[in-house]
Amino acid sequence: MDGIVEFTQGPATEDFGDDKFRFAVEACPHGMVMTDAAGRIVLVNSEAERLFGYQRDELLGEPIEVLLPARMRDAHLQYRAAFARQPETRRLGTGRDLLGLRRDGSEFPIEIGLNPIATGQGTLVLGLIVDSSERKRTDRLKDEFVSTVSHELRTPLTSIAGSLGLLVGGAAGRLPPTATRLISIAQINSQRLVRLINDLLDIEKIESGQVAFKFQRLDARALVEQVIELNRGYADGFRVRMRLDATAAAETYADSDRLAQVVTNLLSNAIKFSPPDGEVAVTIEQRDQAVRIAVRDHGPGIPAEFRARIFEKFAQADAGDARQKGGSGLGLSIVKQIVTRLGGTIGFEDAAGGGTVFYCELPAWAQVAAREIDVERSADAARILLCEDDPDTACALREGLRPAGFGVDFAHSSGDAVARARAIPYAAIAVDLDLPGDDGVGLIRVLRAQPESYNTPIIAMSADGSWDRGEGETAKLNVLECLAKPVNVDRLAQVLKRGIGRRPNGRPRILHVDDDRQVLDLVARALGSAAYVVSAGSIEEAHSALTAQQFDLAILDVSLGAVSGLDLLPDLRSRDGAPMPVIVFSAHATDLAANAQIAVSLNKSGSSLKELVAAVHDRLMLQCSPAGAKST
């Protein structure tokens, strides 16, 4: 959801005559705004006036949406209705950008704390608003500094470590014992610095979204066996044995390279903290919904005072033994970020008999398949969610819709439907109004209230073909049509195509993904005369666009909050499955080399809009040429 100042809930004004309350509100160093049940502003402090450029009297009685950019107001109304049903303290804007709108029309990033307040007249909502412009600027400068220093150091350090290794190996002849010892110390420390730089680069790339994850069906046991073999030499250096306990294959859905990195980091930690002649045991357990990979050591354990911050960046225990082991303090932070991106969880516990068990749990492939996801759909099929309790009916509709270019996932209850619509950007949703034990109308209301599906095309299905029931739900909830059951598949396909829309003839179609709405608007205007531009402000919006239509070219911002625009690369395919050409236009583009799919990488700060337009023009012209047609 792109809405911002999410204030709602609670009846209208009441007398705030308490002087202590007024003094506290005015003394607050952050903006404070209170709203009533209708979303009208009933209280504003001086800092809020300064932030938004309004006088207090100009805001009192106005809807809270006046503080939002116009493009976000419709979405905000949907979110406000959802919040009214479940008012709770929330913090917004820390994981993704939220924007406020000043009186002069300018926008600025904000973070918000929402606090429902129960009163005798109902519930009011007090919002604490913080301008995050300076913090974001500082974070960006810090990230750029770390990245620059890391890149400048890695090349010379790698060269130094390699040269010292050659000297230790006798490349320059036999050295005196004292010189050999000193060079060995220098080599060990240079290698340690190289590992630190690599960890810094890894964490910076993951946080900025420059790491693309390629999910696939994996045999976790085979992958762990390979990682153990690759780390056996490292374990021998510490005189530590490694053992794998896994009796059967365990399949998961993950990125093989990233999962191997997770297991490698857990193994290296366990090896470092194991006593000489000790053993590190790795276990793999297949559960109903997850695959659990656990690494157990026989070390000193985790100090109690360190447990709460063990997965933080640069975190290291203060114990002398932990300091002697070295390391950057980034390994477990990297593991946590990767596992989170893989859709799993990471944790640790004390091991029986001493030591520690670190484990990660990832979605099991059987569970993914059991979610009734249409794994056989073609790459360019529009993805539909079918809320139908009868499996035979659902399967029949799926088979009937595939030839029409649709992939169909199932949800057999309202709870499943809501969860899947929140997790997957469906092109359309079909709802059986007669779900046993559920209210189909209520389900549609919930789907319309959540930001992920508030504007998704919805088709209703009913045994008698009725819908409105005299209450006008069709208009209120924006339902395309109510079809009588048993549903005619051809008719359903026609309604879906009408609701989703198809690719227009003529101009090329470009998908532009960027979380900066001003950049989206500028690029859309710059390219509007030559192409049809679809702007997506998040990876979810991009997935929705990709499920509904075909594109000729994509423009990607690398960093989209906690995710990366590069995560879309596997999904950017033409109708014949060939990679779709991509232009990277991002503040983090300088380290990305052109390849078979990425045509060019442009840095926002160093490239003009004119250069981007020229790159798009050149790529589209190449596609239209005979050579370009062959290459794509």
Image (cartoon, grey):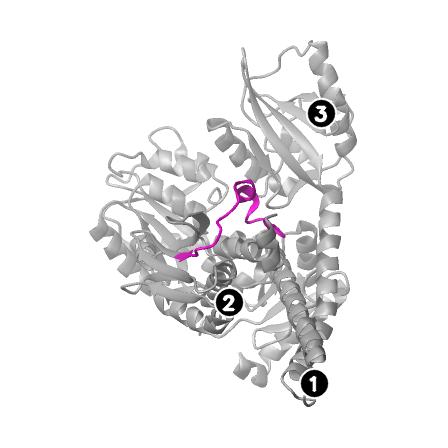
Residue at the far front in the pictured view: 177
Q: Determine which of the numbered discs, if any, sits on residue 175 in the image.
A: 1
Give the mark nearer the N terminus: 2 vs 1. Answer: 1
Residue plotted at (27% across, 39% down): 435
Nearer the camera: disc 2 or disc 1: 1
Nearer the camera: disc 3 or disc 1: 1
Whole-percent x, y for residue 111 in the image: 65, 38
Say which residue label 3 marks. Answer: 59
Amino acid at circle 1: Leu
Whole-percent x, y for residue 379 in the image: 42, 66
The vertical placement of 454 against 180, above or below, is: above
Give the spatial CA distance, label 3 vs label 1.
80 Å
Amino acid at circle 2: Phe
- Please say if the residues under marks 3 and 2 sit with CB atoms less than 8 Å apart: no
Say which residue label 2 marks. Answer: 238
Q: Quick check: is 240 in the magenta stretch? A: no
Pick whichever, 316 or 614, lies toward us: 316
User: How many neighbours does mark 2 have within 10 angstroms: few (below 14), some (14-19), or many (20 or more)?
Assistant: some
Nearer the camera: disc 3 or disc 2: 2
Q: Determine which of the numbered discs, if any, sits on residue 24 in the image.
A: none
Give the spatial CA distance, label 2 vs label 1.
26 Å
- In what element is the residue under mark 2? loop
Q: Quick check: is 316 in the magenta stretch? A: yes
Residue plotted at (48% across, 32% down): 82
Residue 537 appearing in the image: no
Q: Give the range drawn in magenta.
A: 294-317
